[in-house]
Image (cartoon, rainbow, N blue to C red):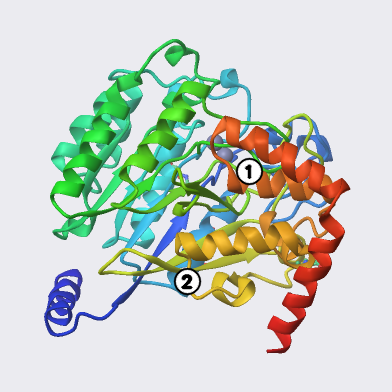
């Protein structure tokens, strides 16, 4: 089947130089909680709630809990039902529950990663999967070493069907790898272990280039340019800031800057970046020195509905989400995103299942998901409250439908606009000031434009 598909593909490429659409899945942050059990008292439904009461527990989970197996299972089978034969699957990690390290242990972590690997393989036996480690896929969590380790080795073995031999080598050394995308000449994927840059990782504190990953990645991108390749980059922890909490980055400052420099230098070959970790649905823009949009990082929503305990975030839960991505197989340009979700409340009542939440081009009125279009989306979010609200509803996968107020607007606009630390600070200053001085006019004008747009 796969062979026929590639032959068909090559034939098509030969006769027609037009765009040939392809699709793939991006799933992330499943966070399976094996302790989830109905019938217990609210504080004891799941270990990941950390004693917070589960007020509406059902077969698909509860907003204070990580995923029960039933939710994981239903997400993978619904992927199969919605799009049974994707070109490939991106899986960006975080498989284990939010519980203290001492409640897991190395073997438990590996066991959970193995179970999730198993179900994806079982349901998609012939599909190539590109898989990145999340900060929860280690023990102790987030403490990824800059050299080879037992866990890197074990997971490389577990994923050996998905990894080329050369990928296995680098994965065992530092949890990262690169391969030709679907083994096609001219196309490449680079899977990063950005957990090495996470400020919670004590093992890489004071290191200049942990596991040599930046040096390696820059070489991969340089070679890609020489070989006229187009590249997708995937990883778990993203650079830049969390949009639900003001001034909250994940990377250490030097690592954040080096990542931005890398994208600015190599953007002509980078056709898309796909990350997770936030559990929310958002995106990050990268600009060149003249402020032209050069690249977009898409942050896909998580499968777990788990309400974050991060101080300063109120009601940070989400509905479970999965995402399909439509792309031009010749340029790797991202054409569209379709997000599917489960209304957890409704599904627990037996009145719903996985359904389409939205399609980017329809809901945001753009022709595609190119950096230019995503820049336009961002500018419109900054100036048009209705448009911003739509983005905000989707940000929590239609869980939090409350109003995105002035402070919320700054949080979301600046996180999407500025991945660099200085740029983010400037954005917060400018946009924050804008709220007091000039926003109402800007909002009125863009509302007028938007009304025109919709009626047209
Ligand atoms: C997983 O979902 C499939 C499809 O709905 C179902 O047939 C199967 O019994 C489920 N397995 C478990 C363990 O829930
Ligand atoms: C997880 O894997 C173990 C074996 O490693 C197996 O016994 C167990 O049934 C699996 N659990 C699920 C829910 O698939
Ligand atoms: C989810 O379902 C609940 C219960 O039926 C409903 O009140 C809520 O409006 C639904 N949310 C969305 C976004 O449809
Ligand atoms: Zn996560
Ligand atoms: Zn994470």
Q: Say which of 201 and 373 sits in front.
A: 373
Residue carrying label 2: 368
Residue 420, how many percent across, how many down? 54, 35
For residue 155, which numbered disc appears in the image?
none
Residue 217, how many percent across, how many down? 28, 35
Relative vertical location of residue 100 with respect to residue 53 in this rendering, above or below: above
Residue at the image position 81 percent from the left and 52 percent from the top: 56
Residue at the image position 34 percent from the left and 54 percent from the top: 121
- CB of mark 2 within 8 Å of CB of mark 1? no
User: Ligand 5 within 8 A of label 1's CB?
Assistant: no
Residue at the image position 44 percent from the left and 13 percent from the top: 203
Residue carrying label 1: 415
At numbered mark 2, what does the secondary structure look like: helix, strand or loop? loop
Quadrant of the rendered structure where residue 319 is?
bottom right
First in sequence: mark 2 vs mark 1 = 2
Quadrant of the rendered structure where residue 426 is?
top right
With 47 as the anchor, is 33 left or right in this view? left
């Amino acid at each position: 089947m796969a062979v026929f598909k590639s032959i068909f593909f090559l034939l098509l490429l030969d006769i027609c130089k037009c765009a040939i659409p392809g699709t793939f899945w991006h799933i992330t942050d499943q966070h399976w909680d094996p302790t989830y059990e109905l019938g217990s008292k609210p504080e004891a439904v799941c270990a990941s709630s950390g004693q917070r009461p589960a007020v509406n527990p059902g077969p698909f989970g509860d907003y204070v809990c990580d995923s029960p197996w039933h939710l994981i299972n239903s997400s993978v089978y619904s992927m199969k039902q919605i799009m049974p034969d994707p070109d490939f699957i991106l899986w960006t990690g975080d498989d284990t529950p939010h519980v203290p390290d001492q409640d897991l242990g190395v073997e438990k972590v590996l066991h959970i990663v193995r179970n999730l690997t198993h179900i994806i393989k079982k349901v998609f036996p012939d599909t190539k999967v590109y898989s990145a480690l999340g900060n929860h896929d280690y023990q102790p969590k987030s403490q990824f070493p800059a050299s080879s380790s037992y866990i890197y080795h074990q997971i490389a073995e577990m994923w050996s069907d998905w990894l080329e031999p050369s990928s296995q080598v680098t994965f065992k050394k530092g949890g990262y790898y690169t391969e030709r995308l679907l083994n096609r000449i001219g196309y490449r994927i680079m899977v990063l272990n950005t957990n090495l840059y996470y400020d919670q990782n004590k093992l890489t504190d004071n290191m200049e280039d942990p596991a040599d990953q930046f040096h390696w990645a820059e070489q991969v991108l340089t070679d890609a340019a020489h070989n006229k390749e187009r590249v997708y980059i995937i990883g778990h922890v993203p650079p830049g800031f969390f949009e639900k909490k003001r001034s909250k980055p994940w990377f250490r400052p030097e690592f954040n800057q080096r990542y931005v420099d890398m994208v600015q230098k190599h953007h002509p070959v980078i056709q898309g970046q796909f990350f997770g970790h936030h559990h929310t649905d958002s995106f990050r823009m990268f600009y060149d020195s003249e402020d032209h949009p050069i690249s977009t990082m898409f942050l896909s929503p998580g499968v777990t509905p788990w309400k974050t305990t991060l101080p300063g975030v109120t009601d940070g839960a989400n509905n479970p989400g999965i995402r399909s991505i439509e792309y031009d197989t010749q340029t790797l340009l991202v054409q569209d995103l379709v997000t599917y979700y489960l209304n957890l409340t409704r599904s627990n009542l037996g009145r719903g299942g996985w359904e389409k939440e939205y399609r980017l081009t329809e809901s945001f009125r753009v022709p595609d998901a190119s950096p230019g279009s995503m820049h336009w989306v961002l500018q419109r979010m900054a100036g048009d409250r209705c448009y911003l609200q739509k983005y905000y509803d989707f940000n929590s996968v239609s869980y939090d439908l409350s109003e995105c107020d002035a402070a919320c607007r700054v949080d979301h606009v600046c996180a999407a606009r500025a991945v660099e630390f200085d740029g983010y600070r400037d954005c917060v200053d400018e946009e924050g000031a804008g709220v007091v001085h000039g926003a109402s006019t800007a909002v009125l004008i863009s509302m007028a434009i938007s009304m025109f747009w919709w009626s047209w």
